[in-house]
Structure formats: structure tokens, C-alpha cells
Image (cartoon, rainbow, N blue to C red):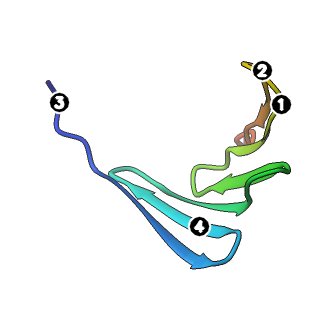
């Protein structure tokens, strides 16, 4: 079993800083509404819990520039 590291800090109400071995991210929002996550790797995720066993998530990644 691999050893993992993950830590989450609450900065302000509705704002969290998440840290793991390879990157960090900031999450805005919380219960009862959409959550927006911006990662240091360029990934942006918007998610929302829906009633019952449903949820919605949209993830976009930053494309690398080819010089």
C-alpha cells in the first residue's frame, strides 16, 4: 500500500487550501451550492451535489503551449 499525504486547511468560511504530495489547490464554495476548485497543475473543477445519489462535475485542464 503506497504512503499518501493530503492535508486540507480552512482559510475562511467557504475557502479551503488543499495540499498533497505533488500539488496544491484552493476550493471556493461549500454546502448547498456549487464548488469551484483551482489547482496548481492547471486543472479547474466545478462540482455540485444534487439531491439523492446524484452529483455534477465539470473539469477543464489548461493546455500546454507549444512554442
Q: Upstream in the sequence, badge 2 or badge 3? A: 3
Disc 2 on helix, strand or loop?
Answer: loop
Q: Position of residue 10 (x, y in %)?
A: 53, 73
Disc 3 on helix, strand or loop?
Answer: loop
Question: Could you tell me which residue is drawn at 59 percent across and 67 percent down?
Answer: 16
Q: Residues within 10 Å of mark 2 (few under 14, many from 20)?
A: few
- Asked whether the beta carbons under mark 3 and mark 4 sit within 8 Å of each other, the answer is no
Question: Could you tell me which residue is drawn at 45 percent across and 54 percent down?
Answer: 23
Is residue 28 shown above or below 33?
Answer: below
Q: Position of residue 47 (x, y in %)?
A: 78, 39
Q: Which residue is mark 3?
A: 2
Q: Is residue 42 left or right of residue 5?
A: right
Disc 1 on helix, strand or loop?
Answer: loop
Q: Residues within 10 Å of mark 1 (few under 14, many from 20)?
A: few
Q: Is residue 18 left or right of residue 16?
A: left
Q: Position of residue 59 (x, y in %)?
A: 76, 34
Q: Nearer the viewer, mark 3 or mark 1?
A: 1
The CA distance from mark 1 to mark 4 is 21 Å
Is residue 24 shown above or below 43?
Answer: below
Is residue 44 shown above or below 52?
Answer: below
Query: Which residue occupies the foreground of this view, 7 or 31?
Result: 31
- Asked whether the beta carbons under mark 2 and mark 3 sit within 8 Å of each other, the answer is no
Query: Which residue occupies the foreground of this view, 43 or 65?
Result: 43
Q: Position of residue 17 (x, y in %)?
A: 54, 67
Q: Residues within 10 Å of mark 3 (few under 14, many from 20)?
A: few
**Looking at the rendering, which quadrant does residue 62 occupy?**
top right
The CA distance from mark 2 to mark 1 is 5 Å
Q: Which residue is mark 4?
A: 16
Amino acid at each position: 500500500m503506497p504512503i499518501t499525504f493530503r492535508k486540507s486547511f480552512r482559510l475562511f468560511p467557504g475557502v479551503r487550501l488543499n495540499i498533497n504530495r505533488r500539488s496544491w489547490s484552493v476550493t471556493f464554495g461549500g454546502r448547498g451550492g456549487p464548488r469551484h476548485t483551482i489547482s496548481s497543475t492547471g486543472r479547474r473543477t466545478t462540482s455540485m451535489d444534487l439531491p439523492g445519489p446524484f452529483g455534477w462535475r465539470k473539469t477543464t485542464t489548461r493546455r500546454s503551449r507549444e512554442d
